[in-house]
Amino acid sequence: MTKPILIIVFLLTTVLAFCQDSLKNKNNVKISILSLVDNAKFQYERLISKNHTIGLTASYFYIKPFTGIKIEPSFRFYFKSQAPINWYVETKFLIGFFNTKEVFNKRLYVYNANDSLIKNEILDEGFMKELTFIPIGASLKIGQQKFFGKMKRFVFDYNFGFQYFPYNYSKKVEQTEYIDTYGNKNVVETSQGGIRDAMPVNGFFWYIFGAGAILNTNISIGYNF
């Protein structure tokens, strides 16, 4: 009975030792220092071959008009079979969950029994409505990653490129209907609108500076283990 147990313990010890050796120095954890203006970004990268790594980036955006999270699974191809250092090309799938506010109007339409419009008035103009939306997109970047320090365990990573991550909140018109005491049909319509129709401030911020910035760059520091 003792001999089989010793054999099992030996095999388990050998497997664990092999796994630990195979995992040695194949992981990078990083934080972005460029994004701290409006979000906290954490990154994990895992070496899978001489040329390739996979990773995951999680960001929390805390500056209005947009707050929310962004998740980015990634795949990198390193040139010259030197992963995870040197120049690389990176592709990412992007998905997020965000909150914002946009300008809406509320208007009342009253129709008589013949379905003719007899009244049209604004009930509330230019009020702010809270919205949630789930953008989905992708990105393509080129970058370079280097190790530094006495043991070459600290990581410096920078990249730049393009992303598609749309500001896709719902612009669907909402309507509620009821019949008043005179038998007329009242339709209350809520729709997006206001002074910012001509100058979409939120959209401009999203695509230039925000989570959906078309030109996208990042600088990160971290640790290799």
Image (cartoon, rainbow, N blue to C red):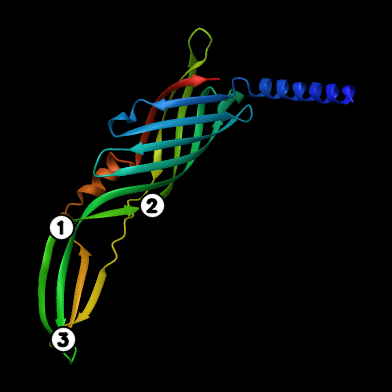
Callout 2 amino acid: Ile
Question: 199 left or right of 7?
Answer: left
Amino acid at dot 1: Phe
In this picture, residue 118 sits left or right of residue 49: left
Secondary structure under tag 1 reads strand
Locate the C terminus by quadrant: top right
Work out how far the residue at label 1 is from the one at label 2, CA to CA, in angstroms: 23 Å
Task: Point out which mark residue 40 bears.
Answer: none
Please tell me how many numbered marks the rendered image carries. 3
Q: Which residue is mark 3?
A: 184
Q: Which residue is at the far top? A: 150
- Provide residue 210's location: percent of width, then percent of height: 30, 40
Classify mark 3: helix, strand or loop. loop
The mark found on residue 134 in the picture is: 2
Say whether marks 1 and 3 touch (CB < 8 Å).
no
- What is the x, y in percent for residue 154? 48, 16
Tell me the crowding category of disc 3: few under 14, some 14 to 19, or many 20 or more residues within 10 angstroms, Cα based: some
Which residue is under mark 1? 127
Sequence-wise first label, 1 or 2: 1
In the figure, residue 7 lies in which quadrant?
A: top right
